[in-house]
Image (cartoon, rainbow, N blue to C red):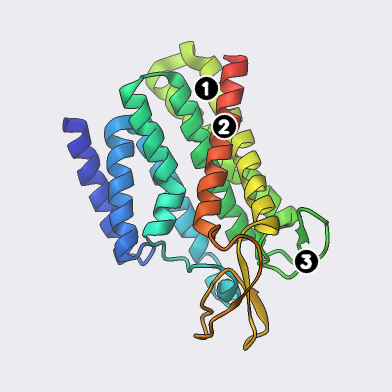
Amino acid sequence: MQRVLLGLLLSAAIGYAGYTKEALSRSGAVGAVLIGTAVFGLGGWDWGILLIAFFISSSLLSRYRRLEKASLAEKFAKGSRRDLGQTMANGGLGALLAIGSALYPHWLWLAAYVGAMATVNADTWATEVGVLSRTRPRLITSGQEVEVGTSGAVSWLGTTATLAGGLFIGLLAALLQLAWQGEEVLGQAWLLLLAGLLGGLGGSLFDSLLGATVQAIYYCDRCAKETERPLHHCGTETRRLRGWRWLDNDLVNLTSSAVGAAVASGLAITFL
């Protein structure tokens, strides 16, 4: 109970800071408190530090060369200020895994968590950095060149950012294990590093696959542009071009994090 209360205080402080720095909306701050309390309180410090690392790094990257990326904001479902849906999509699975680890303690929960967080971090890094690519991206399904910011498109710069984002979470998780428990967990540390790298890559690529195939994509006739928004930023109601209406970007992110967790869990089961 003390750790849960500490998690509540820490996540409330982080949520407030995120709101004042305009990284979170009001509902996003509430989501951060809910997720942070579960992750810190039930998972522990390792889990909480990884969550903070994702939040800080992704928030900083969203501000990087913001003016250059402003023209692409109309394509995305939401802006850089995360709301409740985005926080739940990025951290909801992690909170559920933390609850599972508290009820049925096992190291496998941590590996799955690393894979999930590596996915959302890798996907965020890929988006924030990939849109700055000087070469046009290509659809992951067909290889066709498309406009920057198109759902399901990948580029060499974005893929490099994907690998870096996953590796960042995996490396941090490995270093935390070694710091807390020493060299006797060296094998687990290496697995966590791989879980972050490969889990993040697998989950992020699955995100792109969904974006290119079944995610709901709309078209604004007034602006003559594709978007992920049912209501475009100009105020015009858009028409659906393709995909399942119920599969929005938040659900795509949540599903992809589950794929990343599954990849990481598979690695842990196979090699541990």
Mark toward the start of the polypeptide (3 vs 1): 3
- Residue at numbered disc 3: 136
Mark toward the start of the polypeptide (2 vs 1): 1
Mark 1 and mark 2 in contact (Cβ < 8 Å)? no
Discs 2/3, front: 2
Q: What element carries label 2?
A: helix
Say few, some or many: other residues with alpha carbon within 10 Å of mark 1 (under 14 / 14 to 19 / 20 or more).
many
| Amino acid marked by disc 1 | Ala
Discs 3/1, front: 3
The location of residue 252, given as percent across then percent down, is 56, 52
Mark toward the start of the polypeptide (2 vs 3): 3
Work out how far the residue at label 2 is from the one at label 1, CA to CA, in angstroms: 18 Å
The reply, left or right, for residue 125 in relation to residue 149 is left
The location of residue 122, given as percent across then percent down, is 58, 47
Question: Residue at coordinates 50% horizontally, 30% vertically from top-left?
Answer: 112
Front position in the image: 66 or 240: 240
Residue found at the very far top of the displayed protein: 184
Which image quarter: residue 256? top right
Q: What element carries label 1?
A: helix
- Residue at numbered disc 2: 262
- Residue at numbered disc 1: 189
Question: Residue at coordinates 30% horizontally, 38% vertically from top-left?
Answer: 38
The location of residue 160, given as percent across then percent down, is 69, 49
The location of residue 129, given as percent across then percent down, is 62, 59
| Amino acid marked by disc 3 | Arg
The reply, left or right, for residue 33 in relation to residue 63 is left
Q: In which quarter of the image is the N terminus?
A: top left
Work out how far the residue at label 3 is from the one at label 1, CA to CA, in angstroms: 37 Å
Discs 2/1, front: 2
